[in-house]
Image (spheres, helix red, strand yellow):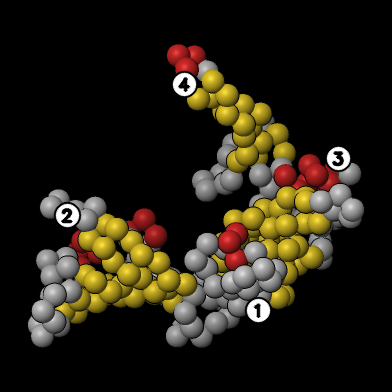
Amino acid sequence: TALAKDLVVGTQFSEAEPVRDGQLVRFKVTQGEESYPLAIQTRRVRQLLGEVMHLPGEQAADGILTVKGDPYGSTDSLQQLMGKEVRIRQSDCGQLRLHIGDEVTFYCILIGDNPPMLEGKVAELRSTNRTPSTLMGCVSMEIPRALEPAKIRAHALPDRIVLAGIPEDMDKDEIRHIFSEFDGQEVIVTHDDADCDRFGFASVSFPGVTH
């Protein structure tokens, strides 16, 4: 129904309720003055909170979330969605590897007509009961530097990120600054003098997302 679609997609903006930091919006782009792009029909996307019931696979297998509310503890206007199953794909989780029981934030779209299905998008980890040694995801990063960028491999754990390929002249302070926006705390850096490439390893601890 039109009401259900509005609940899933979001609500119109109002002056009385400003956008929160990190909140998702949906809009169309048209040509504005002097041919600059202009956002129109902007809508606030209602973020939801869900629990992972079934894991998405690397290929075609879908995962399943169940709706528990929203990240701010509100269930207003969500009665139609509470407890509903939502399909989630690995491509909508980025590099994050989900575990059964994880709490994630996400938003929904309706797909299909006969019958319509709920599909989750942009899933982000909210909380987990995983052990500290559980791998949560792997990424490659390119850090801008004065002479040339540093290409670093990173493995994410529940309470820290482990970095490989640290240049010899990259110290704790530089690494701490890189992750300061994410509340990075203790930084440990090690370099192996026997490594002819003279690249090292580092770890940065965080408050974590565990309960």
Image point (52%, 68%), residue name: 96
Circle nearer the N terminus (2, 3)? 3
Residue flagged by tag 2: what amino acid is it? Glu
Res 165 quadrant in image: bottom left
Looking at the rendered image, the quarter that the C terminus falls into is bottom right
Tell me which label, 3 or 4, sits earlier in the chain.
Answer: 3
Residue carrying label 4: 36
Residue at disc 3, secondary structure = helix
Alpha carbon distance from label 1 to label 4: 45 Å
Give the labeled residue for mark 1: 100
Relative to 128, is 93 above or below? above
Quadrant of image for the N terminus:
top right
Q: Nearer the viewer, mark 2 or mark 3?
A: 2
Disc 3 to disc 4, C-alpha distance: 33 Å
Circle 3 sits on which residue?
2
Q: Secondary structure at mark 1?
A: loop
Q: Front-most of 14 and 26?
A: 26
Gap in Å between the C-alphas at discs 2 and 3?
A: 53 Å
Residue furthest to the front in view is 59
Distance from disc 2 to disc 4, alpha carbons, whole Å, reads 33 Å
Of badges 3 and 4, the one in the foreground is: 4
Residue 97 percent location from the top left of the image:
54, 73
